[in-house]
Image (cartoon, rainbow, N blue to C red):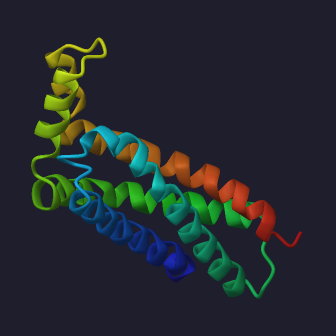
Amino acid sequence: MTKYNIELKWGVIFAIIGLIWMYFEKSMGWHSTHIDKHATYTLFFFPIAVLLYIFALREKKVSLGGSMTWKQGFISGIIIGFIVAILSPLTQYITHTIISPDYFTNIIQYAIENPQGATEEDLRSFFNLGNYIKMAMMQAPIAGAITAGIISLFLREN
């Protein structure tokens, strides 16, 4: 397992930073009074996520003696994404029960008041903890692979 300590470390760091970001979003009112801006403002996390992957893959490169192939960086990033995915049920639970327990109620109410073709039933089936856990578990490895694939192009030696 020591072979993947860096990936484990950065997967946990990513999850913790994600929770801090959720607290930030909540404190900015993006889960309540300014929920209309949430879809746009939540994208500000993207550069943070990229930076985390850069730091992780740079550390991986150092651990490999300063030389890393694209494939090594890509695989490392995929592993980080899977660790984030494994942690996502916990992070989603913390987000939606401790940090922002009213998020789903608020987003459903906003969508009902600003209809875009979805029924209330559709909204409730989309905006709920179970669905968000599933989406996070699917998105984390995909986003991790794409991010790692691009960053590894710049960090590779061979």
Relative vertical location of residue 50 with respect to residue 101 in this rendering, above or below: below
Residue occupying image coordinates x 81% and y 80%: 67
Q: Is residue 122 above or below residue 38?
A: above
Question: Splitting the image into 4 quarters, where does residue 154 fall?
Answer: bottom right
Quadrant the C terminus occupies: bottom right
Going by the image, does 92 lie left or right of 21? left
Q: Residue at x 45, y 78 (%)?
A: 9
Q: What's the residue at 36%, 63% (across, down)? A: 18
Q: Position of residue 141 (x, y in %)?
A: 50, 50
Q: Nearer the viewer, residue 41 or 1?
A: 41
Q: Residue at (74%, 63%) from the top-left corner? A: 152
Question: Is 5 placed above or below 50 here?
Answer: below
Depth check, front residue: 151 or 28: 28
How many numbered marks appear? 0
Question: Looking at the picture, does residue 150 appear above or below residue 73?
Answer: above
- x, y percentage for residue 77? 59, 62
Q: Horizontal placement of 22 versus 155: left or right?
A: left
Residue 129 position within the rendered picture, expressed as x and y whole percent measured from the top left: 19, 42
The outermost residue toward the front is 33
Of all residues, the one furthest to the right in this rendering is 158
Residue 59: x and y in percent read 63, 82
